[in-house]
Amino acid sequence: MTKVLLVVGTRPEAIKMAPVARVLSQAAELELRLCSTGQHTDMLDQVLDFFNLQADYDLRLMKPGQNLFDLTSDILLGLKDVLSEYDPAYVFVHGDTLSCMASSLAAFYHGATVCHVEAGLRTYQKQAPYPEEANRQITARLADIHFAPTVQAKENLLSERIHERSIIVTGNTVIDALHQCLDRLQHTEHPEIENLKTIIAPGADIILVTGHRRENHGAGFVKICEGLKRIVQLPDVQIIFPVHPNPKVKGPVEQLLGDSKAIALIDPLSYPSFVWLMNQAKIIITDSGGVQEEAPSLGKPVLVMRDTTERPEAVDQGTVILVGTDEEKLYIETKALLEDEQRYQRMSQLHNPYGDGKAAERILEHLLKHVNG
Ligand code: UD1
Ligand code: UDP
């Protein structure tokens, strides 16, 4: 049997790797183990529970208010032990986090074949998103197999002289996860969703907000909060904001928005509850990568609180608008969407630029071809 190690560390990696773990675990020729770096704790555990995944190795690295230096070296050293014990032939990493970048470095040092899922996303601006753009580019240099979610991502990799035969366009596994989640939402009760229903103001237009990007910490989040305060002055609007536990987010958000009656600040939601809430929302305001990919599949307009994005496909199709952290722009664009029905209809068309829900199957198919030479 061929040994495969799949590494996750944060909430979005777990969501997007869950479909991959599922298909790989069903292949008779493969022995699969899951390693969690524990870069995140509660937010990661929520996802692993929902997808019935258990980490075979859990490095439990998260420290409150952690920094990039310690986390990078802790992941590298933690992976060293896992790799020497399990000795996998293939190591799968995902996306652009420190867990992804440091694990791919460890896997490269170990001599494993490095497989990068969600490869090729680029802004070509080292500071945005920070440090994710650099993490992606470093991972691309170390990876042997690049699973690109879109044709645009493949083109980025080709322009960096990565061999075409090592790039496979699969679609994004986030859509596989979304389909699985929507299916389970139809058949299972979730007490957290019942609780959410009690928070939602009857008849109000729900605006769902999330934010965490490091380049928005400080002044960016202050401007975002000022913009949100203006938005809830509009009639019949309620903001629901599951707040990221990073102290650099939670601190200012609670301080600046904690008093507003029309803004519900809540803890991060489990994945099914969040998907349910996205479906209830009229507009989504976010700086999240994953949410930008999910929302077009749900037909929800998204205002992205960033100046640039490595996910241009939904911007091109008109579902996503970049508003940066400009308080005025955030307010004006939200107001226009609430008041101009035609504009709203144009932006809320269903689009699937990021996948068809079969990305994980394509990844397995290619892996088996590679294993069998
Ligand atoms: C990380 C990733 C980012 C990804 C995001 C997804 C890096 C450098 N950053 O950002 O790319 O988009 O996750 O959410 O890899 N915390 C908790 N509980 C949790 C998770 C975080 O309390 O379950 C708090 C801790 O104080 C922790 C802090 O948040 O130290 C920051 O976590 P960290 O993973 O360093 O950064 P994120 O902002 O979560
Ligand atoms: N998400 C969630 N609960 C929440 C907020 C987001 O499960 O309270 C999910 C969301 O559906 C998406 C992912 O988390 O799949 C996005 O994670 P995040 O924004 O933390 O990271 P990014 O995608 O920006 O790396």
Image (spheres, rainbow, N blue to C red):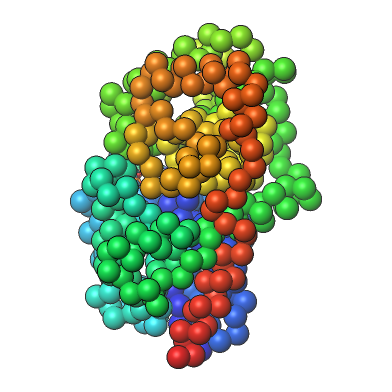
Place residue 5 in its image quadrant. bottom left
Q: Is residue 67 visible?
A: no
Residue 110's place in the image compared with 230, above or below, is below
Residue at far left of view = 69
Residue 84's place in the image compared with 217, above or below, is below
Q: In the shown orientation, is residue 134 left or right of residue 233?
A: left
Q: Residue at x 51, y 78 (%)?
A: 366
**Looking at the picture, how far across and down is residue 318, in whole percent?**
53, 37
* Residue nearer the viewer, 213 or 317: 317
Q: How many marks?
A: 0
* Residue nearer the viewer, 193 or 126: 126
Place residue 312 in its image quadrant. top left
Q: Residue at x 48, y 58 (%)?
A: 150
* Residue nearer the viewer, 164 or 242: 164
Residue 205's place in the image compared with 242, above or below, is above
Q: Is residue 77 visible?
A: yes
Residue at far right of view = 187
Q: In the shown orientation, is residue 69 left or right of residue 301?
A: left
Residue 344's place in the image compared with 20, above or below, is above
Q: Residue at x 28, y 58 (%)?
A: 137
**Looking at the picture, how far across and down is residue 271, in whole percent?**
59, 46
Place residue 116 in its image quadrant. bottom left
**Looking at the picture, how far across and down is residue 16, in whole percent?**
51, 57
**Looking at the picture, how far across and down is residue 245, in whole percent?**
42, 36
Q: The C terminus is located in which quarter?
A: bottom left
Q: In the shown orientation, is residue 281 left or right of residue 325?
A: right
Q: Residue at x 50, y 84 (%)?
A: 369
